[in-house]
Image: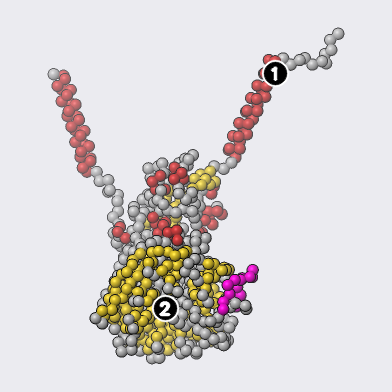
Amino acid sequence: MNEKVVNLVTASGATFIGLVFLTWWLLYNPVRDFVESVPGMDNRPPGFKSRSEAVDIGAYFASFDGIPSGIQGSWPRFRGADFDNISKEKIRLTSSWGDAGPDILWSIDLGEGHAAPVVSNGRVYILDYDEDERADVLRCFSFDDGTEIWRRGYELRVKRNHGMSRTVPAVTDKYVVTIGPKCHVMCVDAVSGDFRWGIDLEREYGAEVPLWYTGQCPLIDDSLAVIAVGGRSLIIAVDCETGEVVWEVPNPNDWKMSHSSIMPFFIQGKKMYVYCALGGIIGISAEKETAGEILFETNLWDRTVIAPSPIHIGDGRIFVTAGYGAGSMMLKLNFEDGSFSAESLQELKPGEGIASEQQTPVFYKGHLFSLLPKDAGPLRNQFVCYHPDDCSQILWSSGKTNRFGLGPYIVADDKFFILSDDGILTILKVSTREYVQLARAKVLDGVDAWGPLALVSGRLLARDSRRLVCIDLRAGF
Amino acid sequence: MIDKTSKKPLKRRDFIRKSLHAVAGLTIGGLAGILFSKSSSEEMVWQLDPNICIQCEKCSVNCVLPHSAVKCVHSYSVCGYCDLCSGYLQPGTKVRDTGAESQLCPSGALKRTYVEDPYFEYTIDEKLCVGCGKCVKGCNSFGNGSLYLQTRHDRCLNCNQCSIARRCPSQAWNRVPASRSYILKGDEKKKFLKS
């Protein structure tokens, strides 16, 4: 009898305890403290879109004592006259420096940024940001000594965001066209600095100011300023003389403005403007009769951030690349039945082959040269050479002791001049077989020397985040 | 007549006794010296050097603690406060929001808050951080390198042989003086070294 009672009590107790645990287990929520990550938890204002204030473009002007130089030659736009970053001048340049280093002819202080100069008719133009006046200013200097001749600009509040200025003007004998950090296009007289016209791409076309501000450099082609907008229109062409919009390309896909610049190419006997927008690549006819007509568009190359511009390799092949995990792609434009179509020949992830984050690679002697981005693994920030037939097979690299950051580079006198982002200028002998370093010297003391280089008559213009220097590269001087 | 000035020959027993006294005295003195020197020298603790760290993720799984003592820290003076933060967002993400699918951090430990156009502030929830360093790798790849890993000394057991250090492929771990127990970046480093 007692044994039965004990068994009954034990079974009942065990059942009760089991039920208690079962109930607890059913009711317990181990993720009760978890917070679901959903969009909108960063307090970004709803419908957030950067919108700059109304700007009176070109309202500010001042003149100074500078006198234009008599030095011949020009570097009229981003990547030079032929859009290839190759100087064609027949001037012998130095291959070495003595202990004193290169000869710095003159230097000027600039607002923080990466904007780079152009040179024409003895004048140096650069779209600077005046931090004291809080204004975008196109500054014109004498190429002789860096003395300022005039400046034209407009008030604009720009907050520091990895620098303020970052574009290269386009200049002809008559006009200078600039694009400011917040998408303000300005055209002035190249000699007098007189204001001609201005366009606020954000307000007038609904363009979106790119992350870290505008990086696109304007193009002047046959007195037309060709500008990528990425708003209501994707690309517009403006008559530099009148400011009238001559043609515009619609933007039904709502592609956005990138940091890449429009490049003119001749493919299949047709001149076209090719642009890497955020959303895809488009080719626009640049022929007079059909100007502005879309020749091709493709979303094969659709990346979040694009800074380098497209490069025409020949045979209809276009090389595109970007940083931030984008890698690179070799596209082929096919021409059949009177129309173009694009196909991908080779697509490479970061670390799989040639790529670039900020600078546009150079195509020279049938090879592609580039500074690899930070996501290139052990080759990060090294200068490299590839053959375009297979952009995954490296021919040579500068080695782990020769890294250049995100700096600019240029070809002249069959040499590469590479500025590392900490201001060291390196001279290389151009070779498709090996890395041949000739000399190197510190030419700038600052940081973030990312602005593209300009070279005219053996004088190199280079900048860091706050200073522009003119370096004499001529041999024997 | 007995010469009282003459020395007695030392007996073997006395010699052994005196020798033992001398050895004991030297031992006690030596031990006291060692203890004194130990007490006066600074304690050393483990720390990883963010300038050598390659963000291999071994710190998150090799600590003897159930949750690694290694956490991500942030140098606000180095940060660019970018909207497109390569330490926060998945590479190639089309949207810049706080959705889990957009975030690089597997545990959602890196938080961001809108400050004003165009700035966002990034903070780390240490309770959620597992020390994997994915955000650090992203930040180093395309940002300023303001995110980096440090072992937190309020958690670290300071093992005689750190199990993370043994497996660190870049040999980023070293013992550092306890008074300088963090290897910081930016203005935080200057303040830390002044204090």
Q: Give the magenta-colored segment's residue range.
A: A92-110
Q: Residue B132: x and y, percent?
A: 39, 51
* Image quadrant where one finds the C terminus of chain A: bottom right
From mark 1 to mark 2, how far is it between C-alphas? 97 Å
**Residue drawn where x is 52% and y is 82% of the image:** A89
Q: Residue A156: x and y, percent?
A: 44, 78
Q: Which residue is mark 2?
A: A217
Q: Amino acid at mark 2?
A: Cys
Please, which residue is most extreme toward the front here?
Answer: A433
Q: How many marks?
A: 2
Q: Amino acid at mark 1?
A: Phe
Given residues A381 and B55, the one toward you in this image is A381
- Answer with left or right where residue A152 lies relative to residue A473: left
Kind of element beneath mark 1:
helix
Q: Residue A151: x and y, percent?
A: 50, 84
Look at the magenta stretch and give its main secondary structure.
loop
**Residue drawn where x is 32% and y is 79% of the image:** A283
Given residues A124 and A23, the one toward you in this image is A124
